[in-house]
Image: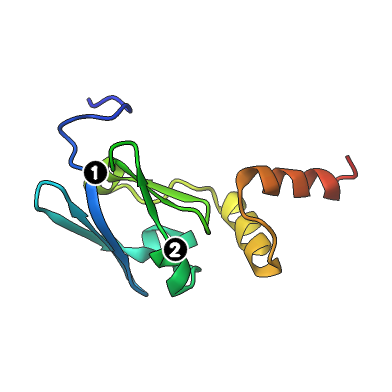
Amino acid sequence: MRSSTVDSEVPGATAVRATEDTLTVELSDGRTISVPLDWYPRLVHATPDERNNYELYAESQHIHWPDLDEDIGVEGLLEGRASGESAWSFRRWLEAKRAGRPLTLDALRQYDREQAGG
């Protein structure tokens, strides 16, 4: 079993493309992996500009979409893992996106506190 730390056996991402229905990641070992965009609901609900605004970090082992507060690991893609986000968390995020509020976890928590009166 692999550890959750960066594993030198896992290739890094070199390029990322997200269309209306597919997430495609080119890897440093020459492979290309494509998965259904439906695996990542935040990407499904993103604009093309939001999908194209990504960053690679942790030796290109992780892909981050700052406009969406979405993170996907290369290892998870290679293992065929879809988003593990709960339905409740995604609904809260989507409500914030539609309302034009900040989408980070801290901003969502702050909004929840304000709504609860504290």
Residue at 53% in and 59% down: 67
- 10 up-or-down from 28: above or below: above
- 88, 53: nearer the viewer: 53
Residue at 22% in and 43% down: 12
Q: CA distance from mark 1 to mark 2?
A: 19 Å
- 28, 82: nearer the viewer: 28
Which residue carries the number 1 mark? 79
Q: Residues within 10 Å of mark 1 (few under 14, many from 20)?
A: few
Q: Quadrant of residue 44?
A: bottom left
**Residue 46 at x, y percent in the picture:** 49, 68
Most extreme residue toward the left is 30
Q: Quadrant of the C terminus?
A: top right
**Residue 40 at x, y percent in the picture:** 41, 58
- 7 up-or-down from 92: above or below: above
Q: Are marks 1 and 2 in contact (CB under 8 Å)?
A: no
Which residue carries the number 2 mark? 43
For residue 83, side relative to residue 2 (left or right)? right
Circle 2: residue type: Leu
Circle 1: residue type: Glu
- 19 up-or-down from 101: above or below: below
Q: Quadrant of residue 109?
A: top right
Residue at 36% in and 51% down: 82
